[in-house]
Amino acid sequence: MNAFTLNTATHAENAAHDIASVLHPFTNLATHPQVGPFMIARGDGVYVEDDQGHRYLEAMSALWCASLGFSNERLAKAGSDALRTLPYYHTFNGRSNAAAIALAEKLLAMAPVPMSKVFFANSGSEANDTAVKLVWYYHNAIGKPAKKKIIARKNAYHGVTVAAASLSGLISNHRDFDLPIDRILHVDCPHHWRYAEAGESEEDFATRLADSLEKRILEEGPETVGAFIAEPVMGAGGVIVPPATYFEKIQKVLAKYDVLLIADEVICGFCRTGEMFGSTTYGMKPDILTSAKALSSGYVPISAVLVNDRVHAAVAANSGKIGTFGHGFTYSGHPVACAIALETLKVYEDEKILAHVQSLVPQFQQGLQRFAARPFVGEVRGVGFIGAIELVPDPAKRTAFDPAKKAGARLAQLALEQGLIVRALADAVAFCPPLIMTPVQVDEMFERFDRAMTRFEAEQA
Ligand code: PMP
């Protein structure tokens, strides 16, 4: 095989070189050599194009990221300007740069609850690992060294680094990685359709989950429980929208036992739920908030951890005792990433993206709901500009398809053949479109999906 040359290779050459050289995340590595890569070559607005010239409407913003689509000129310019001004510097030992300061200020001004400081990292996983370490450091700082357990939820997704994967409540993130680590607990998944008892209302289900959380905290010993982490809407676990009154009731329990709340806004942040943050949509009052993805529209890796004054004051005092806050990444506050993220937030403001999303929500949610009556649809769920359609063999029974059938993946493949990228999360097919979609594109998305669904239905016969 000749050496790979960027952009001049055919699809067959791309595939051969990919198979020979790339270890893919979240991929069946044993079958990848036969399946081969799906290679995206370029982006244009809400569309992407593969290496054979096929164009797709990207209804997942790739990995819940590209909120401003795939060709925003302002972000490209902000990046190239930043590269020419200061391509790299760090923020250790009190070093700083203008982009990091401006971005931190902007985030504090936008935060859904009063926050005191912003810590920068490069990914959602790093942000959540940072949150875990802050919880531990904080409780040492305030003289409660036993208060270290962190409660997460089954089906949560918080990333793949050692602590973040442990917080995640998905078996494939744990199995054979010897995870989760100790001091991480998982409580009930708040999926009403799947886990409520017959006739149980959303409110009663939420009460039951809050009671069960309280019971668990008492069993563990409240003096050992440091924090609770939650995505406002669970993303990779299947776009699980919390039942009515859930966070209100959960937060009452947390307050009673002095348990910190970490909001993982990695997907929900920046207009996705129809508010600037999912915390606003659900009345969450986090002590620590993690964000990434739409923070830079996915254009560069960056994440941010916002901490409130209570946490920051204790952490700062403790670092004074030790002589340093011994945590940080080489790329924390990277000037190019911060400049692009800052520009992203300015675009949200200048182009009134939140109001635009709010205007699209009824069309988007009604478009999804129209699939509720289809023969293999168990549940249609969503909020704001995110949603999912759950496939089942018989909606009256709610039992799942045989996992070996890979029903969700099959529907996603049929959508791809219609020029539409959606994502299968087990048998839920997720939608998380770029926030810049037009009403015409929203219709086009559902028309393509409808054709895929019709073929899926025909295959079940
Ligand atoms: N938290 C949530 C809610 C996520 O959806 C993700 C990624 N999908 C992460 C954390 C991890 O982010 P990353 O892949 O950037 O580490």
Image (cartoon, rainbow, N blue to C red):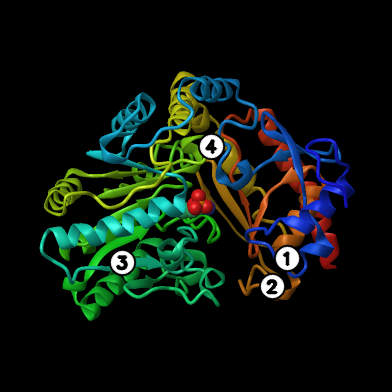
Quarter containing the C terminus: bottom right
Residue on which disc 1 sits: 407
User: Which residue shows up at 13% across the image and 66% down it?
Assistant: 144
**Whether residue 311 is situated above or below residue 117 in the rendered picture:** below
Badge number at residue 401: 2
Q: Is residue 111 left or right of residue 49?
A: left
Residue 53, percent from left and from top: 85, 36
Report, in whole angstroms, how far the alpha carbon at label 3 lies from the one at label 4: 30 Å
Q: Amino acid at mark 2?
A: Phe
Mark closer to the observer (4, 1): 4
Q: Earlier in the sequence, mark 4 or mark 1?
A: 4
Residue on which disc 4 sits: 300
User: Which quadrant would residue 379 be assigned to in this image?
Assistant: bottom right
Q: Are marks 1 and 2 in contact (CB under 8 Å)?
A: yes
Badge number at residue 150: 3
Q: Is mark 2 within 8 Å of ligand 1?
A: no
User: Which quadrant would residue 52 be assigned to in this image?
Assistant: top right
Q: Amino acid at mark 3?
A: Ile
Q: Earlier in the sequence, mark 4 or mark 2?
A: 4
Q: Is mark 3 within 8 Å of ligand 1?
A: no
Q: Is residue 188 left or right of residue 436?
A: left
